[in-house]
Amino acid sequence: MRNLLLTLKFDGRNYHGWQVQNNAITVQQILQDGIEKVLKKREPVIGCSRTDSGVHANFYCCGVITKNIIPCEKFALALNANLPYDIVVLDCREMPQNFHARYSCTSKEYVYKIYNAKVRDPFLYGYTLHYKYLLDAKMLDKQAKDFIGTYDYKGFCGKKSDVEETVRTVKNASVERCGDMVTFTVEADGFLYNMVRIMVGTLLGIAQGRIEQGSVKDIILSKERTRAGVTVSPYGLYLNKVFYGSEDGAKENNK
């Protein structure tokens, strides 16, 4: 058996997240359809994480176990020929048998893009959150730093989640401006349902004066969802990097 690691890039607007669902089209389902067309067999696919409906990925990793002997480069090309325009296989490589796309992952990085201009850009619709009031990116960067650390993020979890363990370690968090684009970047060992979108909603609440500056840690420690900000649109959210340990031979997948 071969343990293959596929790296994908996808536009999430047309999909109800990554994971297969009974009554909705997902990225995993479409990828499995493409694999079945190429290999004439429906192989299992293991994703590095779930993503919400509408969320994009600059870099998504998933594993495929197969007996097929098609070389990795040709397999990637064949898959791309059988996938829709909004899902692309960037790379395929053979991994050790003990490698697991999800459990071998040490951390992930998400970015959230806010188009901060008075007038919306129609070409950015579905890919950013439009916010017309001027944002102080330096101030928000300072607030974002308070997310860093190991905390119980229960208050930053959507109601639909059935996860019992809500402690996560946030390794980095920052806000940067480039022209009219304000980007929130966060890396953690794992994320709860809607966690990044609630983080962004909290920062926007601070920008609006509805949430007090310097209160991020207090909100986290309270574990109360009502104290955090709103859950912003999924369209500005991208899985940006996936980190693996060097012992897995996949550390370069954070590029």
Image (tube, rainbow, N blue to C red):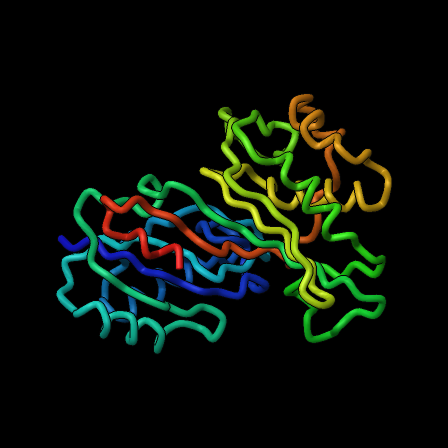
Q: Residue at x 27, y 55 (%)?
A: 64
Q: Residue at x 53, y 42 (%)?
A: 172
- Residue 49 to residue 217: above or below: below
- Residue 142 to residue 165: above or below: below
> Could you say where residue 202 lies in the image, as x and y percent from the top left?
73, 40
Residue 75 or 40: which is nearer the viewer?
Answer: 75
Screen quadrant of the C terminus:
bottom left
Left-right relation of 53 to 89: right
Q: Quadrant of residue 199?
A: top right
Q: Quadrant of residue 73?
A: bottom left
> Could you say where residue 185 lies in the image, as x and y percent from the top left?
58, 50
Q: Residue at x 28, y 56 (%)?
A: 5
Residue 100 or 82: which is nearer the viewer?
Answer: 100
Residue 25 or 67: which is nearer the viewer?
Answer: 67
Q: Residue furthest bottom?
A: 81
- Residue 122 to residue 31: above or below: below
Q: Residue furthest top?
A: 222
> Could you say where residue 233 lies in the image, as x and y percent from the top left?
69, 53
Q: Quadrant of residue 229?
A: top right
Q: Residue at x 36, y 64 (%)?
A: 33
> Could you say where residue 250 lies in the image, as x and y percent from the top left?
28, 52
- Residue 118 to residue 199: above or below: below
Q: How many numbered tags mark residues here?
A: 0
